[in-house]
Amino acid sequence: MLAIETGTGDNQMTKVENFLLNRDSPTYNAYYNGKMSYKLAGTDWEQYVIAAFPGLKDQNTSENIFKAVIDLYAENLVPVPDELKGFSNILPPLLMRGQAPALVDPAGVVHFPEHYEMMSDGSFTIACIFTRNLSKMTDNVVFAYSDGRTRLFSKPVPDDFSPADRMGYTFVEEVGGNTLFRFALDDKGFGATLAALQDRINHSILDQTVVSEMYARPFWYLLNVELPPKNPYLPPQAQQTDDALTEQKGIGGSGGRIFTTSSNGPFGQLTPPTINDMVAYHDSIVDKVPLTTGIPGHYFKPGEGTPPTGVALKVLSKRFNNRIARIRDDLEDELTRMCDLLGVEKTVEVKTDKPKAEQAEAEGTPQPQEDSTVEMEYQLWNTDDDLLQESLDAHGIALSQMGYPLDYIAEVVTPGVDLDDYQEEGGLPGGTSPIPGQPTDMTAMGQQGLTATPGQVQAYGQNPGQRAKA
């Protein structure tokens, strides 16, 4: 458990509280808000960019891949219950930083802060939450503990309404009966990876801007120009100012540039770097986004190229869906605990198998009268427009086309579904078992098509990527 050392009294910040107050963890909010970021190689190029693009750091990027990726993941992680709608406020910082707090006060009101610092050893968590109260004109810092305590410190809002600094907070009160929740991802978030990729994209945008300006301002050269020779016996300050190769600029450098020299040769024009190569390089950077996120590149460039299909789309969607499923697993325990505290209604029926008769007799328990029992669970995620559920549905269709029995498909794709309910309504066709010794039909029932070899069916069934998570 984290050690908590007090100061001179209960109205003083502890050692941990003072550490969290002055901690400055990367939040990546500037990337999410689209601020122009870049990392340049070489001091000369950096000086040129600063001179050519003054105030660039205060501008916004024209291609915010960072926000597009975070928002797409967040859309698939918004809980269904109305009591948890505020959870969407902490999804961007949770995905960027890897962890986020939530607090339920003694009145049963849940708070999802966006500005915070956290520390945890796995069992005990301390969160530092920053807020601003305009009605009372105070900047507040709330330290929340896993044992239910919250300690409030505050100070007046600055006259210019600038962001609050870390000095001058005074103790206000300590309240018990709170519940602190810590949502954490096992991969520590992907803000740093996306930030590095966004830097390269912004760098490429700068390069394209420079190259396009070079096309607008061509390079000319004029050879065989009579330039005054230099006298080696004169001091430097008395030498002629014209160099052997002189650049003649227009007014303000906005026109074309011409280089003159005394060498033999005609007048000509230099070819600037081709813009097509720069665009291809930029597209290659954007194409790296699917490799790290699993989001198809067509999502970022909908008007270009051909959307991925077949195996390529299957691999990308599998990577994206697996990551969404893993994040949901990381969040489900804490969300379930929060639903229990808030009294959220359980609306999903889940059937579980009861012990078999043999096991019941061996254990001395009464023999069950039914094969399964129904339990209620929370519906945390919306599956109406769920990419994960769509992939499972596609997997079930593929199994049905191969001739697998419907009972097996339901067990693999949708565990807990009772096929008898659908059979009574006439919703499912009666399948036919494969004929012994004959190849399995690869097409849906009643359709003409090719048949799969036993090796293909066995390979498909043994592929771990095709098995749904139970």
Image (tube, rainbow, N blue to C red):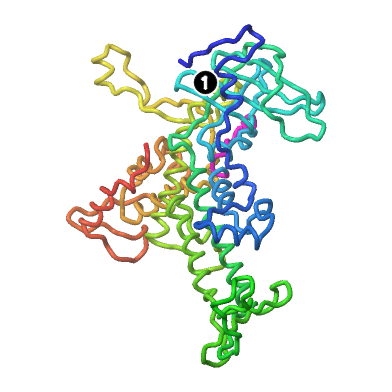
**What residue is shown with label 1?**
125
Q: Residue at x 64, y 34 (%)?
A: 85
Against 250, residue 436 (above or below) is above
Rendered-image quadrant of the C terminus: top left
Residue 1 placement (x, y as % from top left): 45, 15
Q: Residue at x 64, y 12 (%)?
A: 12
Q: 83 or 401: which is nearer to us?
A: 83
Against 272, residue 126 (above or below) is above
Count of labels in the image? 1
Q: Classify residue 232 by image quadrant.
A: bottom right
Q: Residue at x 31, y 59 (%)?
A: 442
Per the image, label 1 sits on a secondary structure element best described as strand
Q: Is residue 434 left or right of residue 99?
A: left
Q: 67 or 387: which is nearer to us?
A: 67
Q: Residue at x 64, y 50 (%)?
A: 35
Q: Residue furthest top?
A: 9
The reply to whether residue 300 is visible in this rendering is no
Residue 305 placement (x, y as % from top left): 50, 69
Residue 300 placement (x, y as % from top left): 55, 59
Q: Classify residue 102 by image quadrant.
A: top right
Q: 233 or 3: which is nearer to us?
A: 233
Q: Residue furthest front?
A: 233
Q: Classify residue 211 by image quadrant.
A: bottom right
The reply to whether residue 40 is visible in this rendering is yes
Residue 86 placement (x, y as % from top left): 65, 33
Main structural element of the magenta stretch: helix, strand or loop?
A: loop
- 214 within the magenta span: no
Look at label 1 and name its amino acid: Thr
Magenta stretch, residue numbers = 75-84
- 78 within the magenta span: yes
Query: Badge 1 local density, few (<14 within 10 Å), some, or many (20+)?
Result: some
Q: Residue furthest left?
A: 437
